[in-house]
Image (cartoon, rainbow, N blue to C red):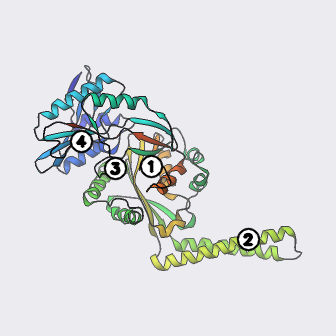
Amino acid sequence: MKFALLSDSEYNDFASQQDRLFLPQTAEYGRVRRREGMRVDYPAVRADDGTVLAAGLLTYQPWKHFFLRAQLVYGPTLDWRNKEVAGFFLDHLEAFLRKNRRVLSLRLNPPVAKAYYRDATKTGDAEIGTATTALLASHGYQHVDKEFSEQADVQVRFIYTKEIAGKDFEEIADSLTPTMRRQVKHVGRYGVSVKFLGPEDFEIFERLHESSRERTHMAPISAASARLYKDLLREMGPERSLLLVAYASPAAYLKEINANLEQLDKQIAKNERPPETTKKVRALKELNNQRDSQLRAREGASRLLAQYGDNVPFAAVLAYRCGNEIVQLLRGLNKDFTVYNRDYPIESALLRWAADRGDITMYNTFGITGDFSRDAEDYNVLEYKRKLDGNVEEFLGMFVKPLSLLAGPLGAIS
């Protein structure tokens, strides 16, 4: 085996062959970061025949003005069951980094399972996770006992995913929970349409994300993050990056409501004709309840049309294709338009997009806190994701290796 630094094209070839690769390990991420002026390396292990056995996208975070922290975010990518390759990579990466006296520490959080779940219920520990933790400890790595909700630069450790391999859209829809499966099959009801937008429309997403953030206490999108996401949209293109926005047309919904009312009035008039029967009385009760519901809907649609106007963006998602999965990175929703979200238009559009590609195996809704109790700050978020009838994935978390005596005093291992 041989330790080497891959070129951009070599890493691109390696990354394109991976089934699972999180966004900060994609070749496009590396190219964008390099254009921003960040140093990016691609450390790797090659077999004697040149085959790449392990590789990662390594970035360097400026620290205390002069120093650096090396980071493998959701990396490296390798078969962690192969202790020989994993140990070789860790040893030689450390030797490589120690040559640069400015590098204080190395942080990594390998995408290795710590435990397995069915939905949000833990079914057992993962042997590969236990073995990888022991391997990292034997190489001097310390576990960072923080979660992303506690420290901004700690990566998400729990995610919620849905396997969709080999399924068409109808099959995916039928595998969802009853509260979602029927609705996602509908398109265009309630005056809703979904558009695929580009980086030039990113401000629309930012406004919706801010609306959600104010309600759920999420972190705001910084100017630097916004630039990164827009650059990734450009770099990855429409086949690898998605900015979906759902639009509400209260005017179109009002037409739908008025048509429904006209039909209901005809049915009510028919059932009011003599003779009176028990069946007609029951039917009239139900029809009048439906009419009252439609009148309330008309009042709400008229109010929103007066307040917002027509064709209003009310829900959005930022997603990227990484390997063979679609990763739903960030969302936004204007709660004033919750009624227009009844058919889950964003999920419907994303799942249709994924099914149409034919080779996407996982629908990844990404981060959750790992607190599954009703008291959790993100309980509503988790409950929404659980409508997919997927599974929680729990990873090992972040590990840090001090590379300098200054790492501790300068806070580079926290």
Q: Decide which of 98, 252 is in the foreground and name it.
A: 98
Residue occupied by mark 2: 287
Inspect the image, locate mark 1, and give the three-letter code of the amino acid beneath it: Asp
Residue 320 lies, with reference to residue 88, above or below; the image says below
Q: Earlier in the sequence, mark 3 or mark 2?
A: 3
Label 1: element kind: loop
Residue occupied by mark 4: 71
Residue 366's spot in the image, x, y percent?
41, 48
Q: Decide which of 91, 278 is in the foreground and name it.
A: 91
Q: Residue furthest bottom?
A: 306
Q: Earlier in the sequence, mark 3 or mark 4?
A: 4
Q: CA distance from mark 3 to mark 4?
A: 16 Å
Residue 168's spot in the image, x, y percent?
55, 43
Inspect the image, locate mark 4, and give the three-letter code of the amino acid beneath it: Gln
Query: Can residue 56 be seen in this snapshot?
Result: yes
Q: CA distance from mark 2 to mark 1?
A: 44 Å
Q: Earlier in the sequence, mark 2 or mark 4?
A: 4
Residue 394 lies, with reference to residue 287, above or below; the image says above
Mark 1 neighbour density, 10 Å: few (under 14) some (14–19) many (20 or more): some
Q: Quadrant of residue 207?
A: bottom left
Which quadrant is the N terminus positioned in?
top left
Residue occupied by mark 3: 148
Residue occupied by mark 1: 371
Q: CA distance from mark 2 to mark 4?
A: 63 Å
